[in-house]
Image (cartoon, rainbow, N blue to C red):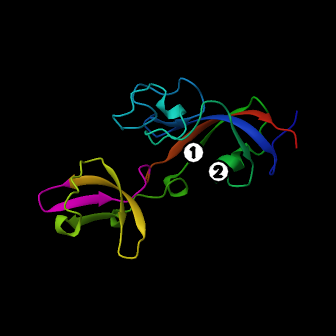
């Protein structure tokens, strides 16, 4: 039976999880719970929200197998490397350390800004996702993690920074060249 090699185009199903078992992404239908795939956006009420591309819950996979070319950086490098040698129907669990996933959590990316330095109409709620722009027109995505009368604390780390990820992979097929 054919085995995956670098450069092969393949179709895989996967479920990505945090160490506590929370599903963060999946190509498999029905993998999400009522909260979605690890999403905490209360506006997402569809039990399969993580399966809709571009939804408001931060999950970006679609139901159904993902196609990728092994070795071209279409997915996490460790997953692509792990696919090499697999045969259709084979399954594997691959752990991606935080440093190779979304990076380690960096306290220096947490900033406290005086309200007087921000637009007066900004009334942030904890958990709100915003884009801050500096005087050089460089933008940064942040999440409000604290606010009081004088300051607002923003976190610019990726929501999954510091998290090791486990992906359960199934090789569906090796596509013809």
Q: Position of residue 141 (x, y in %)?
A: 40, 58
Could one spot residue 85 in this view of the protein? no
| Drawn side of residue 104 relative to residue 72, left or right | left
Residue 151 visible in the snapshot:
yes
Other residues around mark 2 within 10 Å, as few (<14) / some (14–19) / many (≥20): some
Q: Please tell me which residue is depicted at 68% across the width and 55% down the height of the picture.
A: 73
**Residue 89 in the image: x percent, y percent?**
75, 28
- Compared across the picture, whether 152 is left or right of 49 comes to left
For the N terminus, the image quarter is top right
Please give the label number shown on residue 69.
none
Q: Quadrant of residue 168?
A: top right
The circle drawn on residue 78 is 2
Identify the magenta region. 147-160
Residue 12 percent coordinates (x, y): 70, 36
The reply to whether dot 1 and dot 2 touch (C-beta < 8 Å) is yes
Give the distance between the C-alpha atoms of the residues marked 1 and 2, in whole angstroms.
Answer: 8 Å
Using the image, determine if residue 29 lies above or below residue 135: above
Whether residue 45 is in magenta: the answer is no
Which residue is located at x 42 percent, y 70 percent?
Answer: 138
Say above or below: 34 vs 66: above
Q: Quarter of the image for the C terminus: give it.
A: top right
User: Which x, y percent locates residue 99?
Assistant: 51, 58
For the residue labelled by badge 1, is the local secondary structure a helix, a strand or a loop? strand
Residue lying furthest left: 149
* Total marks in image: 2
Q: Which residue is mark 1?
A: 95
Residue 171 picture quarter: top right
């Amino acid at each position: 039976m054919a085995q995956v090699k670098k450069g092969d185009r393949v179709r895989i199903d996967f479920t990505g999880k945090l160490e506590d078992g929370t599903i963060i992404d999946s190509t498999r239908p029905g993998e999400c719970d009522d909260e979605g795939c690890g999403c905490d956006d209360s506006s997402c009420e569809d039990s399969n929200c993580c399966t809709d591309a571009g939804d408001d819950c931060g999950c970006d996979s679609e139901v159904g197998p993902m196609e990728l070319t092994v070795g071209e950086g279409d997915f996490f490098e460790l997953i692509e490397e792990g696919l090499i040698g697999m045969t259709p129907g084979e399954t594997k669990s691959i752990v991606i350390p935080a440093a190779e996933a979304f990076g380690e959590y960096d306290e220096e990316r947490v900033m406290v800004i005086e309200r007087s330095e921000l637009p007066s109409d900004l009334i942030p709620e904890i958990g709100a996702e915003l884009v801050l722009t500096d005087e050089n027109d460089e933008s940064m995505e942040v999440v409000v993690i604290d606010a009081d009368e004088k300051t607002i604390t923003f976190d610019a780390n990726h929501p999954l920074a510091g998290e090791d990820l486990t992906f359960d992979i199934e090789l569906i097929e090796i596509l013809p060249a």
